[in-house]
Amino acid sequence: MTEKTDTAVSKVETQAPATQATAAEEAGKQVRVMRPAADIHETKEGATILIDLPGVSHDTLDIDVDKNVLTVKGDITLDTPDNLTPTYMDVHAGGYHRQFTLSAELDSSQIDAQLKDGVLKLAIPRSEKHKPRKIEVKAA
């Protein structure tokens, strides 16, 4: 289900991809796919999306755009020794999955992605024809 908004980025509600669940079931493990929290900020220059992805490394992060749908997926990497069996864990292995519909006003070919301290920052500029511009008036 897509939320219709007047903004350049809108959220897309999705369920976990079936391929991840099937592969995990075959391996005999349960995979948790979570929907991370996100903040969207829009300016005249474009949009910035901040997504909380604690436990995700650069190696396990996957970002792609297909038909104006931005998809962010990441697997949580836990550094637990093999011989250690935890009694209790606040964070479990699994992954994150989130999708956003991008407006045609945004230039998805120019997305800048930075992952720092568990927060993914996506800067998406507006295409040049959609940026505000000053029109010079000439004297007649």
Image (spheres, helix red, strand yellow):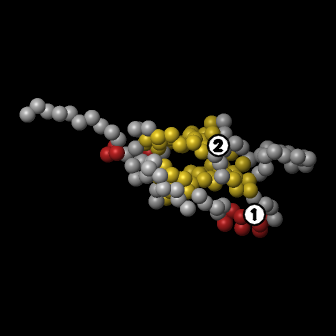
Figure label count: 2
What residue lies at 54% left-to-right and 53% top-to-bottom? 11
Question: Label 2, on which residue?
Answer: 52
Please, what is the three-letter code of the amino acid marked with disc 1? Ala
Viewer-proximal residue among 107 and 49: 49
Viewer-proximal residue among 43 and 19: 43
How would you rate the neighbour count of disc 2 (Cα within 10 Å): few for under 14, some for 14-19, many for 20 or more?
Answer: some
What residue lies at 64% left-to-right and 61% top-to-bottom? 15
Q: Is residue 62 left or right of residue 42?
A: right
Q: Position of residue 118 (x, y in %)?
A: 66, 39
Does 136 sit above or below residue 32?
above
How would you rate the neighbour count of disc 1 (Cα within 10 Å): few for under 14, some for 14-19, many for 20 or more?
Answer: some
Q: Position of residue 19 (x, y in %)?
A: 67, 66
State the mark number for residue 125.
none
Quadrant that contains the N terminus:
bottom right
Question: Label 1, on which residue?
Answer: 24
Residue at far top of view = 139
Check disc 1 and report its element: helix, strand or loop: helix
Does 99 sit above or below residue 78?
below
